[in-house]
Image (tube, grey):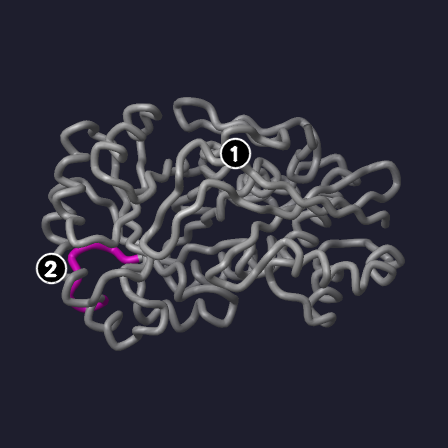
């Protein structure tokens, strides 16, 4: 296989803020793997919370470039196993795994969802994320992008007043993501009014390791709660089943599509609802997520919608939330 790496700095349409950070740009690594006239593309973004930079990912890959290029590629699963054995971080593995899946599907001439035995008869509508800001700015963002489902980032002393005000401007479904900023007491107390205000579920209200608090929430919270920061890798799924109603899988955090498929299967066997989320990726990463959509209860794949300018073509999200899948195999990605 021929390997190529390229760093992009993606400019966001608006400052994106959550409870612990804000940014106007998102660095991302695009990996391409070429074989027999086909090229697959993968992506992983940098993330300060997990200590990941594009440079750190590039250095990891460069250290094993010869081994990657001489690897006898047949299926993505064996390539993923090789990457894990090399001790790469999950973000780096993700970029390479996504590229190998896109390549594999293009070599077969089939989209991944079809290879996995699913159809496009049913898939969830992605939410559109409203980052934390002053309330008028959050209202303006909603009015700029009318959408049927909004994920609202919270984690302030005025969270309930924010949702009361946003509700005056839309009848859309709300999902709340506090990004670990609430206590168990706050979560349980906020939930009844949030439910009345049309909130569907809460995502990761408590710190990732506050299992004692999550046990209280599991027993007393009137709204479903979805794990995000508490569910990073495959081994987290079983534990999360004791405390959460569902999990949000991030491809970058778990190491790509290969482990995500296993996590989806395990979560369903444990009665958990399944969501896949994004990390402000371009259409490269979002197109990979879209291949999983038929298997999901919820999806957060609005990353490319938050960018000033995209770098790729692949999955297209229409204004009504429906998805238009590309004719190409794999994840259907081409770089602009």
Residue designated by label 2: 189
Question: Which sits in the foreground, 28 or 226?
Answer: 28
**Quadrant of the rendered image containing residue 157:** bottom left
Q: Residue at x 14, y 47 (%)?
A: 160
Residue 140 within the magenta-colored segment of the rendering: no
Graded by Cα atoms within 10 Å as few (under 14), some (14 to 19) or many (20 or more), the crowding at tag 1 reads few
Q: Which residue is located at x 49 percent, y 28 percent?
A: 317
User: x%, y% of residue 292?
Assistant: 53, 45
Per the image, the residue denoted by label 1 is 120
Instruction: Please tell me whether residue 59 is drawn above or below residue 335 in the rendered image.
Output: below
Tell me if residue 195 can be seen.
Answer: yes
Q: Secondary structure at mark 2?
A: helix
The magenta stretch is: 218-225
Residue displayed at 30% across by 69% down: 243
- Image coords of residue 38 (percent x, y): 81, 37
Task: State the residue in front, 300 or 56.
Answer: 56
- In the image: residue 201, left or right of residue 38: left
For residue 47, side relative to residue 152 (left or right): right
Crowding near the residue tagged with mark 2, few <14, some 14–19, many ≥20 C-alpha atoms within 10 Å? some
């Amino acid at each position: 296989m021929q390997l190529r790496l390229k760093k992009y700095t993606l400019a966001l349409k608006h400052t994106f803020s959550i409870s612990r950070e804000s940014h106007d740009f998102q660095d991302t690594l695009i990996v391409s793997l070429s074989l027999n006239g086909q090229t697959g593309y993968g992506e992983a973004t940098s993330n300060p919370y997990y200590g990941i930079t594009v440079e750190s990912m590039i250095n990891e890959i460069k250290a094993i470039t010869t081994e990657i290029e001489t690897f006898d590629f047949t299926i993505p699963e064996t390539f993923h196993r090789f990457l894990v054995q090399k001790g790469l971080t999950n973000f780096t593995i993700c970029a390479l795994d996504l590229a190998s899946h896109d390549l594999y599907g293009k070599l077969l001439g089939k989209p991944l969802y079809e290879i996995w035995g699913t159809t496009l008869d049913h898939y969830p509508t992605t939410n559109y994320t409203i980052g934390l800001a002053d309330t008028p700015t959050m209202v303006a963002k909603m009015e700029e992008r009318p959408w049927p489902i909004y994920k609202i980032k919270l984690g302030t002393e005025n969270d309930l007043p924010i949702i009361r005000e946003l509700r005056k401007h839309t009848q859309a479904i709300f999902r709340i993501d506090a990004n670990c900023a609430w206590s168990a007491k706050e979560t349980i107390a906020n939930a009844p009014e949030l439910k009345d205000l049309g909130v569907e579920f809460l995502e990761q209200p408590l710190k990732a390791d506050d299992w004692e608090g999550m046990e209280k929430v599991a027993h007393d919270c009137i709204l479903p709660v979805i794990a995000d920061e508490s569910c990073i890798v495959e081994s987290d799924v079983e534990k999360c089943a004791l405390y959460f109603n569902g999990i949000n899988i991030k491809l970058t955090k778990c190491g790509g599509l290969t482990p995500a498929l296993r996590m989806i299967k395990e979560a369903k066997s444990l009665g958990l609802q399944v969501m896949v989320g994004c990390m402000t990726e371009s259409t490269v990463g979002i197109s990979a997520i879209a291949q999983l959509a038929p298997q999901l209860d919820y999806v957060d794949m609005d990353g490319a919608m938050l960018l000033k300018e995209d770098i790729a073509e692949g999955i297209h999200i229409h204004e009504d939330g429906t998805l238009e899948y590309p004719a190409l195999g794999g994840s259907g990605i081409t770089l602009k």
